[in-house]
Amino acid sequence: MDRIDRRIIDILQTDARAPLKEIADRVFLSSPAVSARIARLERDGLLTGYQAQVDAVKLGYLVKAFINLDMDPQRKPEFYPYIQSCPQVVECCCVTGDYSMLIEVLFATTQELDTFINHLQQFGRTRTQIVFSTPVEHRGVPVSLPSDEEEGE
């Protein structure tokens, strides 16, 4: 992967619907060359998909929370299918520290969150933090190398 591939990934993370012609102009290649690079990045697993960013509040999800779950590792085989089946779970990570799982969720009300936590406690002890604001939204994976930044790219 070279600097041009990194720039293409950066552009697509900012706007996955950017036209090939626009991307080509920005990286100083032809549209077919950019198309071939994107196909290779997809085939190599560097580009794993394209998603629209959605305003959760406008969809009625007024409560965003992070739930820590302390769970016996032997429960993972039953926990993973359960957590994957929960549509309000935005992300679930196995982590180090006092808790074994970090779960990001979205709910319309705190009552719905409370009901979910009650179900989740069948797997272990929880600690919940409700989000007041998000000064930095998810912004993609950094793809620039320090040498790219020095050259102004």
Image (cartoon, helix red, strand yellow):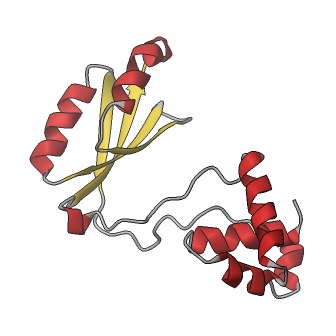
| Residue 145 visible in the displayed image | no
Q: Picture coordinates of residue 91 (x, y %)?
A: 43, 44
Q: Picture coordinates of residue 62 (x, y %)?
A: 20, 61
In the image as oriented, which residue stretches furthest toward the front? 32
In the image as oriented, which residue stretches furthest toward the top? 74
Vertical placement of 84 versus 35: above or below?
above
Q: Which of 47 and 36 is in front in this view?
A: 36
Quadrant housing the C terminus = bottom right
- Number of dots carrying numbers: 0
Residue at coordinates 30% horizontally, 35% vertically from top-left? 86
Q: Nearer the viewer, residue 74 or 144?
A: 144
Q: Quadrant of residue 47?
A: bottom right
Residue at coordinates 68% horizontally, 84% vertically from top-left? 22
In the image as oriented, which residue stretches furthest toward the left? 111
Relative to residue 116, is residue 27 drawn left or right? right
Q: In which quarter of the image is residue 58?
A: bottom left
| Residue 132 visible in the displayed image | yes
Vertical placement of 137 versus 129: above or below?
below
Residue at coordinates 42% horizontally, 74% vertically from top-left? 135
Residue at coordinates 80% horizontally, 81% vertically from top-left? 27
Relative to residue 111, is residue 13 drawn left or right? right
Q: Picture coordinates of residue 17 (x, y %)?
A: 55, 72
Q: Picture coordinates of residue 111 (x, y %)?
A: 10, 45
Vertical placement of 77 versus 83: above or below?
above
Quadrant housing the N terminus = bottom right
Vertical placement of 71 versus 83: above or below?
above
Q: Quadrant of residue 122?
A: top left
